[in-house]
Amino acid sequence: MSSLARKCSPTGESFLSFRSTIKMEKDFQKWHTEKEKIHQRETSPFFHEREIWWCSLGLNIGFEQDGKNENFERPVLVLRRFNRQVLWVLPLTSTDKSGNYYYQFEHQGRKSAIILT
């Protein structure tokens, strides 16, 4: 579903804006409960740069990549480790993706893509 909306620019000129209004049902309360469990863990994993891990990415707003399954997880590539609790990751997908915002590769005989956005 999409809609047209009339907007005004800072100069007072009006213009039409095309806006997508696709609604996706997401269970944010379930994610919040899982996030509390993760926060209460006493130990954190020991990770290194260039490793692939399953990471709980959660449910996100808009078009950010969501986690999957009951733990809201997704495989990620550890790009940079800043300390034991902070890291920079890139989410992975097994869906065939191409374009400027994906990097395709093969891991353990399976085609995958790194999501660069």
Image (tube, grey):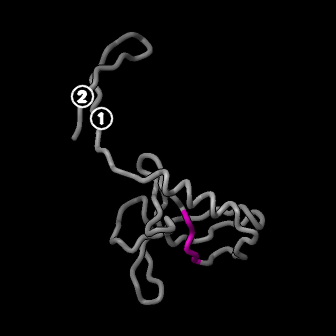
Query: Which stretch did the figure color magenta?
Result: 52-56
**Pointer 2 residue:** 4
76 lies left or right of 25: right
Q: Is residue 54 magenta?
A: yes
91 lies left or right of 96: right
Q: Residues within 10 Å of mark 2 (few under 14, many from 20)?
A: few
For this rendering, which residue is in front, 19 or 11? 19
> Against 95, is 14 above or below?
above
Under mark 2, the amino acid is: Leu
For this rendering, which residue is in front, 46 or 99? 46
> Against 79, is 5 above or below?
above
**Residue 30 in the image, given as x and y percentages of width and height:** 49, 57
Instruction: Identify the residue at image location x=44%, y=67%.
Output: 68
* Magenta: main secondary structure: strand
Instruction: Identify the residue at image location x=23%, y=32%.
Output: 3
78 lies left or right of 113: right
Under mark 1, the amino acid is: Arg
**Pointer 1 residue:** 19
For this rendering, which residue is in front, 111 or 32? 32
Q: Residues within 10 Å of mark 1 (few under 14, many from 20)?
A: few
Furthest-top residue in this view: 12
Instruction: Identify the residue at image location x=34%, y=20%.
Output: 7
The N terminus: image quadrant: top left
